[in-house]
Amino acid sequence: MADEQIQLTKKDRLHVWWRSQFLQASWNYERMQNVGWAYSMIPALKKLYKTEDDRAAALKRHLEFFNTHPYLASPVLGVEMSLEEKRANGAAIDDKAIQGVKIGMMGPLAGVGDPIFWGTMRPVIGAFAASLALKSSWLGPIFFFVVWNVMRMAFLWYTQELGYRQGENITQDLSGGFMQKLTTGASILGMFIMGVLVPRWTTMKFPMITSTIANDKKSLVDFSAINGTGAHKAEDWRNVIDQIRNGSNVDVNKVTTLQATFDQLIYGLMPLLLTLVCVWLLRKKVSPIIIIFALFGLGILGYWSGVLGA
Amino acid sequence: MSAITIILVLIVAFFAGMEGILDEFEFHQPIIACALIGLVTGHPVEGLLLGGQLQLIALGWMNVGAAVAPDAALASVAAAILVTMKGSDVDTAVALAMPLAVAGLVLTIFVRSITVGLAHGADNQAKKGSFRGVEAYHLTALMLQGLRIVIPAALVIAIPAETVQGVLNAIPEVIKFGLQAGGGMIVAVGYAMVINMMATPALWPWFFIGFAMSAVSEISLIGMGIIGVCLALVYLQLSPKFNGGGGNSGGNAGGAGGDPLDDILNDYE
């Protein structure tokens, strides 16, 4: 056996890495990422198994059910490559062990990937990029695309290598210790930024006038000097501006809108309440789609009644 | 509207459709898809503005477990076509994007069901030991996901601009501005989806710290990002949860487990 030890080279592992980006292409309701998993493993299996029987058996055991966060499949791929390598070189690793490792790792890893990537990284990078795009800057999409993909591709490669080198015991490393720290840190950043975004980008206008009070005649600016046609002296203008600076009222009536009342409490109060209501509805298993359409309904109703502004 | 433009738009649609399932390169995110369509149709600024607005709305649209999220791919592609090729304004397109997001969701469920059949085809190829065969089925499924967006996009392109304009002009003012008011609010649903996934009682304070700082200050998003990262780092350094080491070895009463001085003292014992 010593003369025919088969080793997976860096090139093989790079092929697997590239293919792992297509993991979800044939995501299906039966075995989910199973075909994508086999597709990713093929460069390794091709290298390790040469006869048709061996290849058929290898494909069969890698077409079993699999589903995790698409990026966190990489460490599992690394581990499975090292297992297959040992098996091809004669170690007693049966199909059950190979499937067992996959199933054992995918649950805890999915729980790590969702908050880090979907909960923090994408919303944070996306919000920042969107703020640039809204100023008509091309930096927005470019920043999003480059930062996201560099980060993602590096993550896929390094975790796959980690899995390949360390084998099964990385599950402990990944689901406890460092990864838990990373998840907690990411979640803090994510929650903080969500809080930051709520008052800034949720647009709720309440132009409805709640009160109109006539201002005291004595507090009004005396416009008489610059009233009427013809040239006015700079002196008179200065006088009017001084009056305004000193706090005299320009308008005859003091108008208070609903918006002003809310902003007086704290800026962004209504968006905050809206967000909390949405969280509560989601917790009650209301579909986000229903909430979105309900908000459109609310918008039409609110605009029609004059409470909400466009 | 030249044939080349249409082909380029459909290519963008194809990539968006594939990424809608892959979730890797993120071509289906509004900020990318809308900007690209804006670029190839010669309306880059409109594309950027639409992409930015839709991106904010779609921040939290994610496929976690069995949860159903609206589809960003069809929403961004079709809305971008409406704005850049049919003369719709950005706000109306944002409102129209929502039913399109639902349509995209239904289509992806449909394709994911068809793919069950393709997976069985892959099983048969596996029995023969054919790598090529398995690969072919896998990539066929990917093509289907791409076509899932290309076909509806082609249909939207096929509608004459006058018809779109006619329909848009026929929308009463109340509905139009009401949808705009609603469009400003639906961003909150995306925030709520992110929060709903992450929130634990221990994390809620961070949300309110962020809210209060944002409401009373003018600090830019980058500034807020830096503050957020620092808060997270400080929390990890101070939290007893991640600093259990000192407490176990020394038998000290344990608040300051990560204190280097403490460790040195423990070594002397």
Image: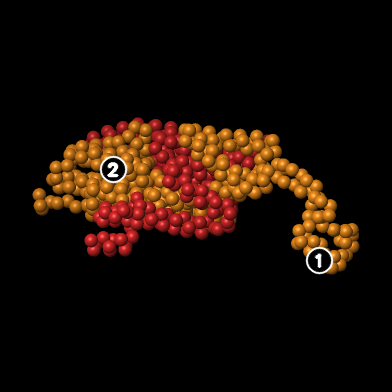
> Which shade is chain A?
orange
Please, what secondary structure does the residue beneath circle 2 have?
helix
> Label for residue A238?
1
> Alpha-carbon neighbours of circle 2 within 10 Å: few (<14), some, or many (≥20)?
many
Residue A268 or residue A149, whichever sits in front: A268
What is the quadrant of the C terminus of chain A in the image? top right
Q: Please name the amino acid that badge 2 sits on.
A: Met
Residue B192 or residue B39, whichever sits in front: B192
Q: Which chain is red?
A: B
Vertical placement of residue B11 versus A95, above or below: below
Q: Chain of mark 2?
A: A
Residue B88 or residue B244, whichever sits in front: B244
Vertical placement of residue B121 versus A105, above or below: above
Residue B206 visible, this orientation:
yes
Q: Please name the amino acid that badge 1 sits on.
A: Arg
| Residue in the image at 87% along x and 65% along y | A232
3D distance between C-alphas at marks 2 and 1: 76 Å
Residue A58 or residue B179, whichever sits in front: B179
| Residue B161: image location, x then y, percent | 62, 41
| Residue in the image at 59% along x and 47% along y | A268
Residue B169 visible, this orientation:
no
Residue bearing the label numbered 2? A105
Q: Chain of mark 1?
A: A
| Residue A56: image location, x then y, percent | 22, 38
> Alpha-carbon neighbours of circle 1 within 10 Å: few (<14), some, or many (≥20)?
few
| Residue in the image at 10% along x and 53% along y | A3
| Residue in the image at 58% along x and 37% along y | A295
A7 lies left or right of A30: left
A139 lies left or right of A215: left
Total residue callouts: 2
